[in-house]
């Protein structure tokens, strides 16, 4: 497919259908294959797909004309016409498919969190270092326009030294929202601690660097197998600065999804709340920066467009091992 990067999506739940919609607007990409164990989804019926953020067309029928459809993800990985393998299955399955795709010479985009344990992570990193293809993990909040604008302003030094920072990610309940209700099984998802809170953990490290120590307390409210459904984490940088992040998904289903932050610095406060992202200067003036949304309004749009741009157009086929 000259001038286009061919994408195969594994998993057609909330994130898989979200990625499907995003790729339709990425000029350099075309979805050519799909794999899912659900026969209804393989026919384009995604009426049972539910998400906790974004809204959109995630449950509307999908036209899969011209798209190769597979029940077995390994068959999609073996498809010579697929350049990028986009993995959107439950967390516990990420490892097997990501490694298989990298061994097959594919470029791999994998939804977060990459895996369930540190041992799995170390095994994966070793494989990724040997791979011929590009790899990225879907920590989309790094690319979310409001967070990106705050990061760029902070890193420019204009706001001065950070004094305190609070990040928050609170979701309506996800019980019953997934295939085999895997979100509620700690062995599959890692609970809100790993599946949801990981975004703000990443943001703290991305903004401020590695802390000297981390302390977290959590509660298991609705998950099975001891999954943590609400967590509060503090980060100690050894210099008196206070950084905290809070995440949870045990609210009633009608509750509003909240993603917010307040970063208090010497010269300004950077704040994302229901009114949007604003910078409050010490003199009382409020500045509302223009956001970079040329690739789309969400971090999903930004991260997938970036990944597609990383893949060469002229000869995207990589030699298999």
Image (tube, rainbow, N blue to C red):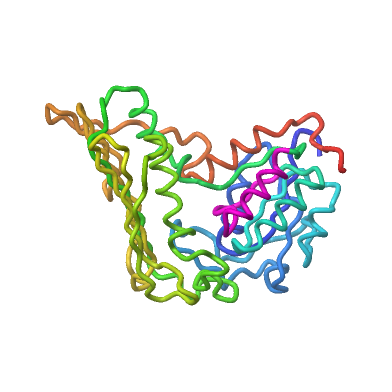
Residue 3, image quadrant: top right
The image quadrant where one finds the N terminus is: top right
Of 164 and 1, nearer the camera is: 164
Of 223 and 170, nearer the camera is: 223
Residue drawn at the location 38% of the way across and 40% of the way down? 211
Of 316 and 95, nearer the camera is: 95
Residue drawn at the location 63% of the way across and 48% of the way down? 122
Query: From the viewer's perspective, is 73 left or right of 90?
Result: right
Q: Residue furthest left?
A: 283
The image quadrant where one finds the C terminus is: top right
Where is residue 259 drawn, in percent x and y?
35, 52
Residue 312, image quadrant: top right
Where is residue 96 drawn, in percent x and y?
72, 58
Q: Is residue 110 magenta?
A: yes
Q: Is residue 170 magenta?
A: no
Where is residue 245 drawn, in percent x and y?
33, 51
Where is residue 271 drawn, in percent x and y?
26, 41
Query: From the viewer's perspective, is 39 left or right of 142?
Result: right
Residue drawn at the location 48% of the way across and 58% of the way down? 194
Of 258 and 115, nearer the camera is: 115
Residue drawn at the location 72% of the way across and 70% of the way down? 37
What's the magenta region?
108-129
Q: How many marks?
A: 0
């Amino acid at each position: 497919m000259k001038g286009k990067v061919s994408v195969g999506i594994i998993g057609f739940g909330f994130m898989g259908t979200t990625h499907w919609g995003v790729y339709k607007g990425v000029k350099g990409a075309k979805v050519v294959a799909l794999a899912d164990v659900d026969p209804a989804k393989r026919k384009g019926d995604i009426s049972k797909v539910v998400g906790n953020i974004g809204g959109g067309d995630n449950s509307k029928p999908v036209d899969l004309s011209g798209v190769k459809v597979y029940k077995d993800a390994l068959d999609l990985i073996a498809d010579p016409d697929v350049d990028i393998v986009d993995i959107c299955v439950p967390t516990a399955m990420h490892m097997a498919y990501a490694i298989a795709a990298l061994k097959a010479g594919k470029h791999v985009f994998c939804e977060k969190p990459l895996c369930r344990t540190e041992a799995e992570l170390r095994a994966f990193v070793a494989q990724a270092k040997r791979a011929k293809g590009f790899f990225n993990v879907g920590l989309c909040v790094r690319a979310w326009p409001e967070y990106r604008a705050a990061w760029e302003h902070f890193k420019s030094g204009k706001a001065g030294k950070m004094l305190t920072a609070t990040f928050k990610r609170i979701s309506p309940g996800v019980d019953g929202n997934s295939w085999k209700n895997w979100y509620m099984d700690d062995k599959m998802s890692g609970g809100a601690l790993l599946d949801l809170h990981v975004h703000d953990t990443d943001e703290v490290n991305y903004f401020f660097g590695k802390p000297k120590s981390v302390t977290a307390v959590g509660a298991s409210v609705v998950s099975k197998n001891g999954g943590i459904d609400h967590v509060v984490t503090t980060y100690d940088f050894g210099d008196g600065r206070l950084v905290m992040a809070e995440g949870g998904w045990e609210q009633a289903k009608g509750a509003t999804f909240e993603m917010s932050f307040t970063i208090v610095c010497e010269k300004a406060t950077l704040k994302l709340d229901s009114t949007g992202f604003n910078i409050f200067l010490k003199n009382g003036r409020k500045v509302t920066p223009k956001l970079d949304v040329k690739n789309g309004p969400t971090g999903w749009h930004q991260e997938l467009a970036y990944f597609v741009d990383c893949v060469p157009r002229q000869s995207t086929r990589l030699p298999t091992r």
